[in-house]
Image (cartoon, grey):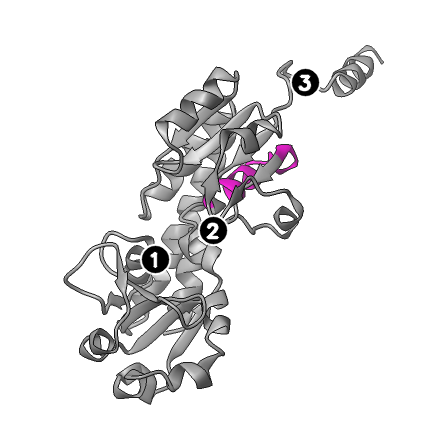
Amino acid sequence: MQKLVVILLSLILGFNISGKAQKRIITLSGALTETVDALGYGAQIVAVDVTSTYPAYINKLPKVSKDRAVSAEGIISFAPDLVLAPENAISKSLEYQLKSAKIKVVIIKQEFSAKGAPVFIKQVAAALGNPAKGEQLAKQTEISINKALADVKKNSKSPKVLFLYARGTGVMMVAGKDTSMDAIIRLAGGKNAAQGFSKFKPYTTEALVNANPDIILMFDFGYKSLGGINSILKMPGVMLTNAGKNKKIIEMNGELLINFSARLGEAISELNSKW
């Protein structure tokens, strides 16, 4: 009976059983948001950035950014205890403003690799003050990734894949080396058809034809913004590639592809299944 009273008082006062105040958390990337949720702290997220869409309930939360621009006033208005941000997402001056307002800010670096995903999870868990939970989730994630990679090795296909980022028919970009898309393509057993440059560069018909990908990969929203496969096949140069000739234009959920966290094994398996 006495134990029950203590638990009830803790809940009423807004404290957890360990005596620590419940955090109000803001996450500034999709990977951070879904990792916080996977660690069991989703109910404490009060706002997110515009890239956060998973799990589904996240879409009902307020956004602290507009066109990825974040302000101190916008963040402070939600009275957070903790702000989790990816490396280079916020300026030093913004970080200083938040810390001056007594808000804890933790910058987390993400490595786009099989080994980087468990490390990322552990970093987030440490920021939440629950490293034990982080170890548990990291171990589960490692098992999932290793199984996915083992399945990839059984698939003899190793296609040349060109990732095309689009939001309508305006400026489109392709992913070179040192990008999350390059990493996920390679983990899934493919080869990045875009060679000779790092990061992203504007898409051109000449570059597409020269790359001659076996597959053109797109985020689902980009695929839809261009009107689907029939419209994409009519784009200049597409039918001159192996991808166009074989109608191998594939789409996948963008946040799943680039999360490189607890769902990395799932992303590897799903992408490999589309070869």
x and y percentages locating residue 211 in the rendered image:
20, 75
Q: Which residue is mark 2?
A: 263
Is 219 displayed left or right of 43 in the figure?
left
Is 3 displayed left or right of 232 in the figure?
right
Which kind of residue does numbered mark 3 sit on? Ile
Local secondary structure at mark 2: loop
Whichever of callouts 2 and 3 sits on the residue coming sooner in the sequence is 3
Bounds of the magenta segment: 31-45
- Magenta stretch containing residue 37, yes or no? yes
Rendered-image quadrant of the N terminus: top right
Local secondary structure at mark 1: helix
x and y percentages locating residue 201 in the rendered image:
25, 61
Report the residue at 36% width, 27% height from top.
92
x and y percentages locating residue 153 in the rendered image:
30, 64
Q: Which residue is mark 1?
A: 149
Task: Identify which residue, 190 or 60, lies in the foreground.
Answer: 60
Report the residue at 59% width, 50% height from top.
55
Residue most extreme to the top: 2
- Label for residue 38? none
Q: Main secondary structure of the magenta part?
A: helix
- Label for residue 17? 3
